[in-house]
Amino acid sequence: MSLPMYDVSIPAFLRGFRNLRAVLDKGVAHAESTGFNPAELLQARLYVDMYPLVGQVQRASDTAKGCAARLAGIEAPAFADNEASLHDLHARIDKTVAFLESVTPMQLEGSEERIIELKLRPEPVRFSGKAYLLEFALPNFYFHLTTAYDILRHRGVPLGKRDYLGLQ
């Protein structure tokens, strides 16, 4: 039995954003309860050459909306990377979720074999839709979700695996 591409992609992205939103909320609550400005979290990073928290959320958003659009054969909405507050990050997540919810199962039918070409350095990379989703988009999406979680955890936010998995 095969799984429809929609079932493997859109619900996973939606759940990831729901959990990310909850983790960000815990970050704000922790900042407020310990007396530091929640906005400081935006530029927190694990290492100097890695994206800060704001960049991790932006990349998760770009990955999910780009994947859904490529698989559906439609244009992804363009979002400026100008989030300056945690409220702005919530708005970015909300816009991404709204786009994902607009994609229908029918739009992804047959996308397993659609050729997806990404302009990656040093040269373009081609995937089947199935390989793109399973070997590129989902791993990248989870990388950025995990890194956002790790940044907050590193800053002392009391989070656990249940928060990441959305089991709270």
Image: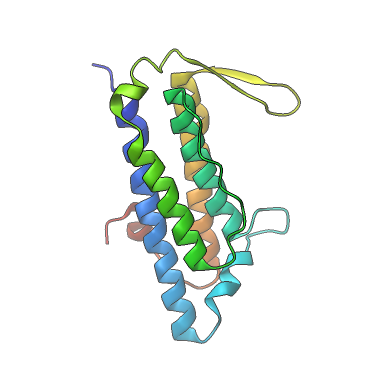
Q: Residue at x 64, y 20 (%)?
A: 125
Above or below: residue 155 compared with residue 135: below
Total tally of numbered discs in the picture: 0
Could you tell whether 20 is left or right of 135 in the image? left
Q: Evaluate whether residue 153 shows in this view.
A: no
Q: Residue at x 51, y 63 (%)?
A: 88
Name which quarter of the figure residue 167 lies in: bottom left
Give the quadrant of the C terminus: bottom left
Position of residue 111 measured from the top left corner of the image (x, y, whole percent):
40, 18
Position of residue 153 measured from the top left corner of the image (x, y, whole percent):
50, 66
Q: Evaluate whether residue 106 shows in this view.
A: yes
Position of residue 117 measured from the top left corner of the image (x, y, whole percent):
59, 20
Above or below: residue 82 compared with residue 38: above
Q: How is the image coloured?
A: rainbow
Above or below: residue 53 compared with residue 142: below
Q: Residue at x 43, y 20 (%)?
A: 130
Could you tell whether 110 is left or right of 128 in the image? left
Could you tell whether 31 is left or right of 165 in the image? right
Could you tell whether 126 is left or right of 26 in the image? right
Give the quadrant of the N terminus: top left
Position of residue 43 measured from the top left corner of the image (x, y, whole percent):
63, 65
Q: For the view shown, which residue lies furthest in the right direction? A: 122
